[in-house]
Image (cartoon, helix red, strand yellow):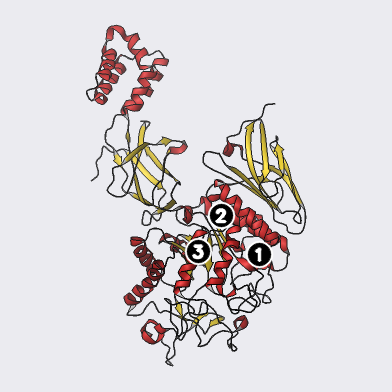
Amino acid sequence: MTDGKLRVIIENVQPQVDAGLYPAKRTIGERVDVIADIFGDGHDHIRAELLYKFGKKAEWKVLEMQSAVNDIWSASFLTTEKGSYYFTIRAWIDHFDTWYDGFKKKAAAKVDVTVELMEGAEYLHAVAKGDAKIIAVAKKLEDKANQSQAIATVLSEDFAKIVHERPLRQHETLYSKELEVHVEHTKALYSTWYELFPRSSSLQAGKHGTFQDTIKLLPRIAAMNFDVLYLPPIHPIGKVNRKGKNNNVKSSAGEPGSPWAIGSDEGGHKAVHKELGTLEDYKKLIAEAKKHKIDIALDVAFQCAPDHPYVKEHPEWFKQRPDGTIQYAENPPKKYQDIYPFNFETEQWSELWNELKSVIVFWIEAGVKIFRVDNPHTKPIPFWEWVIAEINKEHSDIIFLAEAFTRPKIMSSLAKVGFTQSYTYFTWRVNKQEITEYMTELVNGPSRNYFRPNFWPNTPDILPFHLQHQGENIFIIRIALAATLSSSYGLYGPPYEFYENTPIDGREEYFNSEKFEIKSYDWRKTNRMTDIITLLNKARRENPALQSTWNMTFCSIENPNLIAFLKTTDDLSNIVLMVVNLDPHGKQSGYLQLPKDKLKMGPKLNIKLQDIITDEQYTWTQDWNYVELEPNKMPFHLFKLDVRESQM
């Protein structure tokens, strides 16, 4: 039986994930806004406190919670360290404050408060704890000969301060859980990715690129203000069942095959493709990239080519078919004869798990801090929960990006069990309604506490239909949206920069895909897209408001082809407004209204706007202000706002 004197109920505490089964996620410098429904029976006043600490063994820090409408209470704390914070809530009926509120009402109504003064004196003695000043105030209330002075004492500001600072603590309800918030470094939230195939990095047409060639491209990528360079798998490529051009089941002599068909007689997941260079060359690439403030992201694809050493050494790790062959990967009607998936239901699953963990550890020891994980949704979620937790025990600064274009619940589960970031459905959210609904879900839905999006307008696997036949402007529109809606975004670089949009007929796939052949790019070339990407990424670096996904507010704008949203820092020191014309073909215009409550704006305003990309300047003084965008000139405005009170 519970203590019958505990009258306060604490429920619906947020943030929490699956009733506290998994930690909520934040990065260093992010605020944790704790809210809860806290209430009791009757009209007695409630006091509530947020208790939080860094690490299990630390002492609790205490913050007073504030109440709002409908019994919702809140308080916030700032994260300053990597690791785990814990928090809980306690609350109680404050009879002293309840008495005080009633006394003020009775005094105002000029009713007799003799007994109330006696009660007040008792409360003062209860909270005084030997404080002579408080006891002296209690004696004033007990002085029946000077009741008017006693009433004046209770109604004074000094007395109100006593009531607030010395709550009467009795019968405290402590929330049943200590909830965890896992805090990671800022790159978990804010990162800018450029993907290229190192075998296509040579400046010499037709030549297989190397890590040394990729090093030569680092200044170019750094100049575009990217901070992550992601390379597809760098391991030996299988020779058995090697795929040819355009995924042909037969390869011709000299065709390089798919980097995702990992392993050959030259080695497996811990080896480097010899035409790319050596392990030492790869380490040099990592070191040189750091000089440019770029991290190298390694692709982790847990699958094997038929001639991978694992197939011969551990046939029990693969699914055997009745005819004695090993089951290759399929996603009907697609077939991947060059890839064998692991059988995670093998009796030797523990050995398999530990070997795959050792692959990640091997590359961490080589200097890798970021892993883009290929198709994690095709491997058991308990495996990912285990292996990420194991890695985090020794290496707290590793980022795992889940390349999981799959069903929502699976994507959510992967994020809950430890993936730092995830690919998203942004690739297919195109019109205003789709974008608005999806961003509202990401920012305001329950997944906000565990799912960090990374927006990609294209990938080597995906050339979305909207990029295929609408010209250059749609490329600019989509990159502008990706770079400003999400604080982490990436692009499959050279094809996007150079507007490659030739598909396999009727499919969202590149014709002559780089997955199956070496491309020759003119890496010395730049164009309008290069310049826009550079300026967008520069804006992201210089404007803290663009370094978070969670601070976005959509603005009203009277045109379905225009979308506008605001991003601000907590203190409003940095305010950015993005307006995008979603129509790549024609001029669109409309009137836009800023959210006054969000900006704490007065009735009359003088708003200075500077377009970060074009340097154009405007002044807005009305509630609704005119916007016009011609896509051939620039299909978006990225404004920095200076909000001032009008002097008129």
Question: Mark 3, residues whose alpha carbon is within 10 Å: few (<14), some, or many (≥20)?
Answer: some
| Residue 11 tag number | none
Task: Looking at this view, name the residue that lies furthest to the bottom.
Answer: 323
Q: Is residue 431 above or below residue 8?
A: below
**Which residue is labeled 2 in the image?**
486
Task: Looking at this view, name the residue that lies furthest to the top.
Answer: 145
Q: Mark 2 or mark 3: name the one nearer the start of the chain.
A: 3
Residue 332 position by quadrant: bottom right
Q: For this view, does 395 lie left or right of residue 412? A: left
Q: Residue at x 71, y 42 (%)?
A: 617
Can residue 588 be seen in the rendering of this structure? Answer: yes
In the rendered image, residue 217, in percent from the top left (x then y), is placed at: 58, 66
Q: Secondary structure at mark 1?
A: helix
**Which residue is labeled 1 in the image?**
497
Q: Mark 2 vs mark 1: give the one in front.
A: 1
Does the residue at mark 2 contact the one at mark 3 (Cβ under 8 Å)? no
Q: Mark 3 or mark 1: name the one nearer the start of the chain.
A: 3
Q: For this view, does 355 lie left or right of residue 539? A: left
Does the residue at mark 3 contact the one at mark 1 (Cβ under 8 Å)? no
Q: Report the amino acid beneath label 3.
A: Glu
Q: Report the amino acid beneath label 1.
A: Glu
Residue 603 or 98: which is nearer the viewer? 603
Q: Mark 2 or mark 1: name the one nearer the start of the chain.
A: 2
Q: Secondary structure at mark 3?
A: helix
Q: For this view, does 79 lie left or right of residue 592? A: left
**Which residue is labeled 3 in the image?**
288
Spatial distance from mark 2 to mark 3, Cα to Cα? 28 Å
Q: For this view, does 375 lie left or right of residue 179? A: right
Q: Is residue 102 above or below residue 420?
A: above
Q: Report the amino acid beneath label 2.
A: Ser
In the rendered image, residue 391, in percent from the top left (x then y), is placed at: 36, 64
Question: Mark 2, residues whose alpha carbon is within 10 Å: few (<14), some, or many (≥20)?
Answer: many
